[in-house]
Image (spheres, rainbow, N blue to C red):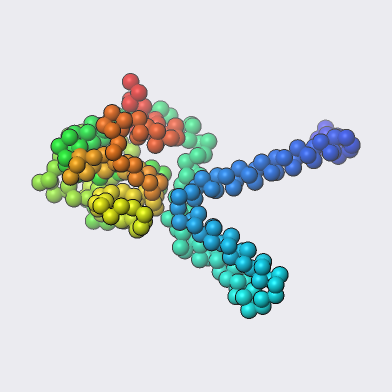
Amino acid sequence: MLNFLLQVFQTPPFYGTWRFLLDLLDIGIITFIFYRLFLLIRGTRALQMLIGLAILAAATVISQVVELHTTSWLLQNFWTIWVLAIIILFQPELRRALAQVGRSSLFNWFYPVEKTPVLDEVVKATLSLAAKKIGALIVFERDTPLEDFMEGGIAVDGEVSQELLTSIFLPYSPLHDGAVVISGKRIAWASCYLPLTLNPQLSNTLGTRHRAAVGLTEETDAIAIVVSEETGDISLAAQGTLTKHVEPLGLKIALTQLFESRREQNRYVHEFRH
């Protein structure tokens, strides 16, 4: 039967139509891949790197056409090492891209529903800290493990609650100076010192907590909440982008939207919709 169908599609007029449909599918797949790649690297150093590579590729072609032998030789030797250089220089971007690909997997739709008040407790604690102008940095671990970033951190392994989170960030607490990391239903770490962003486009007025939140989310898929101890302002960081002046009433909605996959909705947000 299969051989018969193949023979049918290989004879006119079916072959032309079949070939046309396959070409459309081929173009669609390539277009989708490039589109997803653009979304993954948009706003990162990798996009600037690709623009630079495109310029170098054009320079390579031009140097060969006009017979600039020395320039052509130099550029051709560059292309032999650029793959390794990209892997070394852009490890954070590549790691984040792979994590995002993993999060978009269809398997995320098959996790069982879990009722958990984690996000609700975090929101209540954040609003309480903001009202009192107590500085805080709360991080949600997602698919990328954060063990490598727990420098100086103290293992807690406590249940997520408004009371515990608030007590950790009180000025007289020995754990207040640093980030709290939430993994699943537990407060895994406290007093963690996170990598600071080196993004020159950020305002010089941003404090250490804000720079740490951006720095971590540049290198991982984590989500971070920042409370300013000077103004009580609430900020959210994700994918290396900082959103300031998050309204208290909009914090729930903003966090829910950031946890886009169904698995994370079940993990953090389910009871949030009552």
Residue under the image location 43 percent in, 29 percent down: 112
Percent x, y of residue 97: 48, 49
**Residue placed furthest toward the right:** 12
Residue farthest toward the bottom in the current orientation of the protein: 70
| Residue nearest the viewer, comparing 26 with 243 | 243
* Residue at x 70%, y 43% (from the top left corner): 26
Left/right of residue 185 with respect to residue 40 in the rendered view: left
Quadrant of the rendered image containing residue 121:
top left
Kindly tell me whether residue 155 is visible in this rendering. Answer: no
Q: Quadrant of residue 16?
A: top right
- In the rendered view of the protein, which quadrant contains the C terminus? top left
Front residue of this view, candidates 220 and 231: 231
Quadrant showing the N terminus = top right
Q: How many marks?
A: 0
Q: Residue at x 17, y 45 (%)?
A: 230
Residue 252, given in percent of the width and then of the height, sits at 32, 30
Q: Position of residue 101 (x, y in %)?
A: 51, 44
- For residue 78, which quarter of the picture? bottom right
Q: Is residue 94 left or right of residue 270?
A: right
Residue at 17 percent of width and 47 percent of height: 176
Q: What is the x, y in percent for residue 5?
A: 83, 34
Q: Is residue 14 left or right of residue 135?
A: right
Q: Residue furthest front?
A: 66
Q: Is residue 220 above or below residue 129?
A: below
Asked if 272 appears above or below 59 in the picture, the reply is above
Can I make out residue 53 in this image? yes
Q: Is residue 74 left or right of residue 210?
A: right
Residue sticking out furthest to the top: 274
